Image: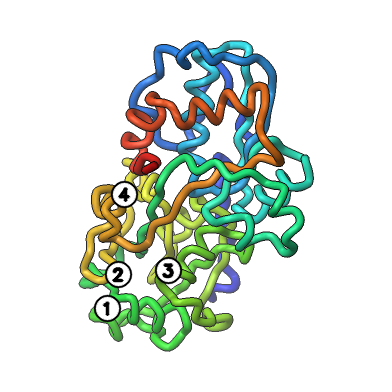
Amino acid sequence: MLYGMRRFSALAIAATVVLSACSSSATPSPAATPASTTGNCVTGSITAAGSTALQPLVQAAATNYGKACPGATVTVNGGGSGTGLSQVAQGAIQIGDSDVTAQSKLATPLPADSLVDHIVARQGWIVVTNKDVTGVTNLTTQQNVDIWTGKDTNWNQVGGPDLPIVLIFRPASSGTRSTFKKLVLNNAVEATGGQTLTEDSNGAVTTAVTTTDGAVSVIGFAYYNDPANKPLLNGLQLDGVDATVANMASSTYKLAADGHMYTNGQPSGLTAAFLAYMLGPDVQGTLIPSLFYAPVVH
């Protein structure tokens, strides 16, 4: 019984990671450590939290910034886009990481209106299945709608094996879920019964898919392309288009969105310096492509 299955944890993603002079093993290692922050070192401590799809990039950038600026500590937490936006609006953290705009996620306009949006990357997601789902390499938009609304419940309905489909959802606060629902499901009402699970981060979803027969879900490019994960997953095309950074950057691949880092008002001090670093050449030119994001297009 699926309801008796244990929940999978992703402690490396969900736990607080303090990033200054050391790096985390929870995400792919950055391709290179920057030689400098172009002289923009500011001491102090700040916290960024929210999107787990954006977290590998923010964690790696925080690690590199801490190495170049030993007096700076950037703590990076997950929790989902909704959590990050709520916490930064309340003043509990300095940066709220999000896959979606504050106006589309927060319940009332007032907190959203006080937030300043800093777009730092373009990010993509991919539909993935457990390796036992053989014979399925592509799902159309309509097939995804039929699967995620519960119309199709067996993989043999889309050319796969005679195996029940297990949907691995993210919580309602998740920006990944909101983005997939908007861009692929056309805001259709998702299945609420049948064989479903809910996991609270991209990392936990990845673990659940790799260990659950017939599972399908959606994860960020950085998680799918992690050498520890990719051999354990089937990554699917969407409408016959490969889930690649090049296709995302050209808008050929539609399951993509901006990565936002929100502040409550205009940033200052270490917050401003770190955001400037996120938009500088070390992150945009080196770190972002190494982790399978695309740079900001102005």
Query: Do the residues bearing badges 4 and 1 touch, measured as CB atoms within 8 Å?
Result: no
Is residue 85 left or right of 29 when viewed as pictured? right
Name the mark on residue 230: 4
Element type at marker 3? helix
Query: Do the residues bearing badges 2 and 1 touch, measured as CB atoms within 8 Å?
Result: yes
Element type at marker 1? loop
Indicate which disc, 2 or 1, sits on the residue closer to the N terminus: 2
Residue type, label 2: Val
Q: Quadrant of residue 134?
A: bottom left
Indicate which disc, 4 or 3, sits on the residue closer to the N terminus: 3
| Label 2 to label 3: alpha-carbon separation | 24 Å
The mark closer to the camera, 4 or 1, is 4
In the displayed structure, would residue 85 be above or below residue 227?
below
Is residue 89 left or right of 211 when viewed as pictured? right
Indicate which disc, 2 or 4, sits on the residue closer to the N terminus: 2
Q: Nearer the viewer, residue 222 or 284?
A: 284
Residue identifier under label 2: 133
Residue shown at 37% from the left, 76% from the top: 144
Give the crowd class for mark 4: few <14, some 14-19, many >=20 residues within 10 Å.
some
Element type at marker 2? loop
**Most distant residue in the bottom direction:** 151
Residue type, label 3: Leu
Q: Nearer the viewer, residue 112 or 178?
A: 112
The mark closer to the camera, 2 or 4, is 4
Indicate which disc, 4 or 1, sits on the residue closer to the N terminus: 1
Residue identifier under label 1: 161
Residue type, label 1: Pro
| Label 2 to label 1: alpha-carbon separation | 6 Å
Residue identifier under label 3: 183
